[in-house]
Image (cartoon, grey):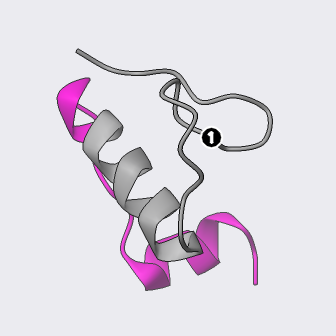
Amino acid sequence: MVRSLTAKHEPATGELAASNEQLVARVVTIARIVGRDIASPAEARAILRL
C-alpha cells in the first residue's frame, strides 16, 4: 500500500519527515513499488542539466 503525501510533504499519518533524506527514501520506495528506475546522482544532474 502506498500512502499519499500532502503539499507539506507529510505522510497521510500526519508525521513530518525528519529530513530531506527521509523524503527521498520515501520517494525511492514508492518508485520501486510502481516499477520505476532510480536515477543515480550523476543521472539526476544530467536530467536536471546541473
Residue 23 spot, x, y in % from top left: 51, 58
State the residue in front, 43 or 9.
9
Q: Which residue is drawn at 22% across and 15% down?
A: 1
Q: What element carries label 1?
A: loop
Residue 36 sits inside the magenta stretch: yes
Q: In which quarter of the image is the C terminus?
A: bottom right
Q: Residue at x 35, y 60 (%)?
A: 25
Asked if residue 5 lies in the magenta stretch, the reply is no
Above or below, 26 relative to 12: below
Count of numbered labels shown in the rendering? 1
Q: Nearer the viewer, residue 20 or 40?
A: 20
Residue farthest to the front, as pictured:
14
Q: Residue 3 at what x, y percent from top left?
A: 40, 21
Rendered location of residue 32, percent (x, y): 21, 39
Q: Is residue 34 left or right of residue 27?
A: left
According to the picture, the residue beneath numbered tag 1 turns out to be 10
Query: Taking 5 as reference, is 20 above or below it?
Result: below
Q: Check disc 1 and give the amino acid type.
A: Glu
The residue positioned 61% from the left and 79% from the top of the image is 45
- Residue 28 horizontal/vertical position (percent): 33, 51
**Does 28 sit above or below residue 24?**
above
Q: Which of 2 and 32 is in front in this view?
A: 2
Residue shown at the point (58%, 72%) measured from the top left: 20
Taking the image as shown, residue 36 lies to the left or right of residue 3, namely: left
38 displayed left or right of 43: left
What residue span does the magenta drawing correspond to? 32-50
